[in-house]
Image: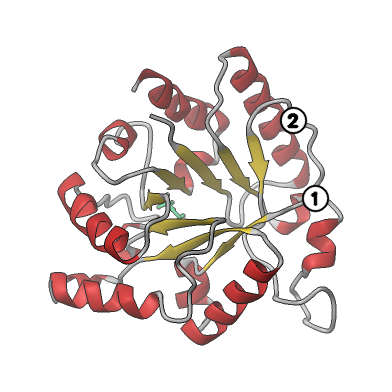
Amino acid sequence: MSKILAANFKTNHTRASTAEYIAQLDQWMQKNGYRDEVYIFPPFTALDSFETKSSIVVGAQNAYPTVKGSFTGEIGLEQLDEFGIKTILVGHSERRHLLGETQEFIASKYRWFTERGLTIFYCIGEPLEVREQGEEAVRRYIVEQLEGIDTSYENLIMAYEPVWAIGTGKTATPKLIEKTHAVIKSLCDRPLLYGGSVKPANIEEILSTPGCDGALIGTASWDVSSMVSMLETVIEQ
Ligand code: PGA
């Protein structure tokens, strides 16, 4: 079965190292006949029109819901269009919790980009204190993170990323992923990825979890050989 893998570079890689990474990955994917979608989200400064021959898609980690304007530190649609970028992450926990994006703002950003047809990776996931309150609290939290979100949007890819598992080395157990994915799928019938400390050592188990359509990978995606080893797992599955 096909799986979607996505690499979120966050604030890592330069323009030069991103180009090198994409060239190496593209070459490997062609050589190995890898056809499933692989998304790469480099930092803004590394965005470009990459001439790849494989199924690599380059997306943006963020953008402001505007064509252009006065939004210091942000980029808009005009800057994405320059490089033909049609994919964007929305609702990532680092933007919610470190940069203070509210659900209301996230929903308006989501709506704006859906109206322009972009593919949206919409990220949701509960912090530790909510997980500790049990399944029902997690469900309520997820419902709140879907507020204002058109879950029937055809270019939507969902990502479940529990905050306590992001960049911490703590991965959710397959059982917990399966349970939570079932809750999310009952609310939104779109491809659903898992994210949070996915790495070569655990990706096979994660991708075999029922209801898991792929993975959104941070830390373990930054090194191209580690990314390749995760793609090998998809081929072997
Ligand atoms: P991680 O990040 O793989 O480093 O936990 C995942 C993410 O934030 O998308």
| Residue bearing the label numbered 1 | 84
Q: Quadrant of residue 27?
A: top right
Crowd class of label 1 (few under 14; some 14 to 19; many from 20; radius 10 Å): some
- Residue type (three-letter) at the residue carrying disc 2: Thr
**Figure check: 1 above or below 161:** above
Q: Is residue 211 left or right of residue 74?
A: left
First along the sequence among labels 1 and 2: 2
**Figure check: 73 above or below 86:** below
Crowd class of label 2 (few under 14; some 14 to 19; many from 20; radius 10 Å): some
- Residue type (three-letter) at the residue carrying disc 1: Gly
The C terminus is located in which quarter? top left
Q: Is residue 33 left or right of residue 159?
A: right
Nearer to the camera, 141 or 18: 141
| Residue bearing the label numbered 2 | 52
Residue 86 percent location from the top left of the image: 70, 54
Nearer to the camera, 123 or 185: 185
Residue 170 percent location from the top left of the image: 27, 52
Residue 180 percent location from the top left of the image: 23, 59
Q: Residue at x 30, y 70 (%)?
A: 126
For ligand 1, tell me if the residue under mark 1 lies within 8 Å. no
Q: Quadrant of residue 7?
A: top right
Secondary structure at numbered mark 2 = loop
Does the rendering let one see residue 129?
Answer: no
Discs 1, 2 touching: Cβ within 8 Å: no
Colour approach in the figure? secondary structure
